[in-house]
Amino acid sequence: MTPHADFGRFFLPGPTEVHPDVLVAMERPVIGHRGPEMRDLLESVDQPLRLLFGTNRPVFISTSSATGFMEASITNLSRRRVLCLVNGAFGARFHAIAERCGRPADRLDVPWGQPNTADELRTALLAEPDRYDLVTVVHSETSTGVLNPVADLCSVVSEFDDVLLAVDGVTSVGGTRIEFDRWGVDFLLTGSQKALALPPGLAFAAASDRALERAASIPSRGFYFDLVEFNRRAGEYSTTNTPAVSLIYALQVQLERIENEGLEARFARHQRMARRTGEWTEELAKSTGQGFEVLALEGFRSPTVTAISLPAGISGPAIVEHLADEGITIATGYGRLKGSAIRIGHMGDHTEAGLEVVLDTATTAIEVATND
Ligand SMILES: *Cc1c(COP(=O)(O)O)cnc(C)c1O
């Protein structure tokens, strides 16, 4: 099937536009989730999911949004105190989840647009070596477009015996290379509706042996999000509860599409779209003589989402609205950056040609806003 004529106009940084072939997959009949057909379906997605996570371990599938597995990482992996690395809204969400789950937690904040660094993490862990047993970090911070140096953070955490690292990979898994095993991550999660370009409703995660041992030692780890159960079920190609079967059909088709493109080609495409969006921002700053800037520090920019801070007097929501009038969807800044930034999601199946249309239309919107 050729892409729908309207495909390629929805550039939110999640949910991401879903290809029509993937949507159609959900029309297959629902099957019993304890039968052989379900087992075959889950077996067919097992290897492709492991490739996306860079792991030889099973990848868990949860019928929930990604936040479910964020909560699971807190309730299953911390007995003592959590250190949450925060450089944006989703890092802060991890801390809020810990508090709401009754787990003591501290924040290590850096300014939005900056990465969380290995040195700062080491200093915090060394200050009181027995204080924390879990560190959380967001790989690609969707609110700022920063890609955190997860491999470096992992090696710091591995210097401490009893500390685990949980990573939110919601806008990185499927958008950039993940090396779960080689980096030595303990828990890494994502959701269906961002870089994987599936409809919302599924979450995926991998857990290390250390993580599973920790989970098994925590009796009050919850029921729906019990990682020990997820691991047991994944090992036999089954699910903990009734899964969203139709979404798993969509997953199967999308994983085939990803394999056909090739992981390296897919990651390179995202990288080129991020670079192009950065160049466009620089051109805009030059041509207008105003302060348009990519929020994320150079060298730490996510390949899947770009946040652009706007000069005073230019409103993010006004630009978003102008694009909406042209049938194109992008996002305003997140949270406190709502008025003063815009965000473009260039993940999933978006093309460079599609991105050019968005950028051209945004240029016009900004010219209109500047002359107002
Ligand atoms: C969207 C997002 C989430 C929340 O995902 P839900 O699927 O809505 O629960 C968490 N972290 C990051 C980085 C995100 O982009």
Image (tube, grey):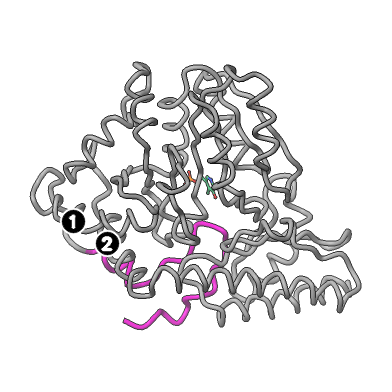
In this view of the protein, which residue sits in the foreground, 53 or 203?
A: 53
Q: Tell me the CA gap for discs 1 and 2.
A: 8 Å
Element type at mark 2:
helix
Give percent across and percent down for residue 194. Answer: 48, 57
Q: From this view, report whether residue 266 is shown above or below residue 163.
A: below
Q: From this view, report whether residue 224 is shown above or below residue 282.
A: above
Q: Quadrant of residue 261?
A: bottom left
Q: From this view, report whether residue 270 is shown above or below residue 132.
A: below
Horizontal arrangement in the rendering, residue 42 relative to residue 337 (left or right): left
> Which residue is painted at 67% across and 50% down in the image?
334
In this view of the protein, which residue sits in the foreground, 22 or 219?
A: 219
> Which residue is painted at 65% across and 41% down in the image?
118
Horizontal arrangement in the rendering, residue 56 relative to residue 14 (left or right): left
**Mark 2 surroundings: few (<14), some (14-19) or many (≥20) residues within 10 A:** some
Q: Which residues are magenta?
A: 1-27
Q: Which residue is mark 1?
A: 41
Element type at mark 1:
helix
